[in-house]
Amino acid sequence: MLRLGAALFLTSLAPLALHAQDSTAGPRGQWHIGITYHDYGVTIGNAARTNGLRINFQDAELERVNGVNVTIWKPVEPLSGTVNGVALGLAGPAAEYLNGIAVGVGGVVAERRARWRTAA
């Protein structure tokens, strides 16, 4: 019984050790939940890279989205990353590069370049 208790305790600490070793987490972190395989699939939260559907409240330290990026609020400055596909947002989707269709109620912002169509 003592061995089982010790094994359960050590197993409960494993996520903490894995998080401490995550070198991709920046100041705001890359917290997200995903149904993905090698970054392909659906992510909810601040995933740095997604190929598929990415749903997030506020973008920070974005690297690349190939597919659909849905965001609610304006991103954290400085703008970063590339969205290839569709960028949708209420306060306005924004990234360093927007390639595809970008639609935002509050506007659309591309730090360096926007290709194809944008609408606000």
Image (cartoon, grey):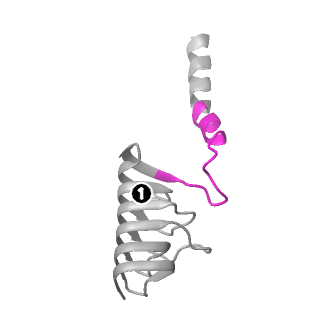
At 57% from the left and 63% from the top, the residue drawn is 61
Q: Position of residue 74 (x, y in %)?
A: 51, 78
The quadrant in which residue 20 appears is top right
Q: Position of residue 95 (x, y in %)?
A: 49, 73
- Near-viewer residue (99 or 10): 99
- Near-viewer residue (9 or 65): 65
At 56% from the left and 23% from the top, the residue drawn is 8
- Near-viewer residue (107 or 83): 83
In this rendering, would 69 be left or right of 21? left
At 44% from the left and 50% from the top, the residue drawn is 33
Q: Is residue 66 above or below residue 72?
A: above
Q: Is residue 107 magenta?
A: no
Q: Is residue 1 above or below residue 54?
A: above
The quadrant in which residue 120 appears is bottom left
At 43% from the left and 87% from the top, the residue drawn is 107
Q: Which residue is mark 1?
A: 44
Q: Is residue 88 above or below residue 61?
A: below
Name the residue type under label 1.
Ile
In this rendering, would 37 be left or right of 81? left
| Quadrant into which the N terminus falls | top right
Give SS at disc 1: strand
Q: Position of residue 55 (x, y in %)?
A: 39, 63
Q: What crowding class fits label 1: few (fewer than 14 Cα within 10 Å), some (14-19), or many (20 or more)?
A: some
Stretch of the chain drawn in magenta: 14-32
- Count of labels shown? 1
